[in-house]
Image: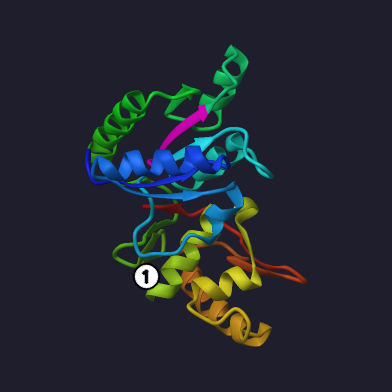
Amino acid sequence: MAAGLSIVVVEDHDLLREATVATLCAHGHHAVGLVCAEDVDTLAGAALPDLFVIDVGLPGEDGFGLAQRLRAARPAVGIVMTTARTRIGDRVAGYGSGADIYLPKPVDPAELLAAVHALGQRLRLADPAAGQLRLDVQQQLLHGAGGTVPLTHAEALLLAALAQAAARTLDRWQVAVHLGLDRRLADRSSLDVRVSQLRRKLLQAGAPRPAVQAIRGHGYRLGVPVSVA
């Protein structure tokens, strides 16, 4: 896993984001760029990122908050934090929020690539994240005290998105997207049916109630931590 990592770059400076993505792709990684932390909640695809490169000074939720919730949902994920904030207090906050490596800007491309390589080595050797409930997105399996429960592709993507979302909550339109539904046509009743199926599987795997809550006027909230591998 030291090469060919799946990497998400969260950076609001357009030129810097594009240059970082281009550098990573040129060295054999699959990298995509996002403008803000909130965009992480809309990620879709069978493979979850191995590693995040996160700017601290993001609009909306800052890099510290994003790193903290990513680390809570996926204990083994790689996180490189980049920022112009280089005081010791900022560095301590960065590591405290879950960063593996804290790089001051401007970041030399060679140093970024070295950091990514080092984290790739760690990811290759790491054991799967442990927890009361653990989601294997690739295998579409939910592991818990109640046993192992198979999920559909859409259910696995939705559960991963909920586990990593801010406050473990997604808007209805985001839920529709992860379930493969047309966000413009999906109504509340159709979403409730799909979400209730995921709720039953969470309970079957050993999740306490309420496993997934409907939030009036908003969307749905995952009521229990789930580690994602």
Task: Look at mark 1 in the image and give the residue it sits on.
Answer: 149
Residue nearer the viewer, 105 or 157: 105
Name the residue at 42% across, 29% down: 100
The x, y position of residue 192, in whole percent, is 62, 81
Describe the element under mark 1 as helix, strand or loop. Answer: strand
205 vs 133: above or below:
below
Q: How many other residues sit within 10 Å of disc 1, few (<14), some (14-19) or many (≥20)?
A: some
Q: Nearer the viewer, residue 72 or 184?
A: 184
Q: Residue at x 54, y 81 (%)?
A: 194
- Furthest-right residue in this view: 217
How many numbered badges does the structure rendering display? 1
Name the image colouring.
Answer: rainbow
Q: Is residue 100 above or below residue 208?
A: above
In this picture, is 1 found above or below 149?
above
Q: Tell me if 31 is positioned left or right of 178 in this view.
A: left
Left or right of residue 182: residue 141: left
Q: Amino acid at mark 1?
A: Val
Q: Is residue 66 magenta?
A: no
Q: Residue furthest top?
A: 88
Which residue lies at the image location 31% right of the left edge and 25% below the top edge?
110
Left or right: where 112 falls relative to 218: left
Do we see residue 75 in this rendering?
A: no
Q: Where the N terminus falls, by quadrant?
A: top left
Magenta extent:
76-82
Q: Residue 169: image x %, image y %? A: 63, 60
Q: Residue 119: image x %, image y %? A: 31, 33
Q: Is residue 22 above or below residue 160?
A: above
Query: Magenta stretch mostly in which secondary structure?
Result: strand
Q: Is residue 4 visible?
A: yes
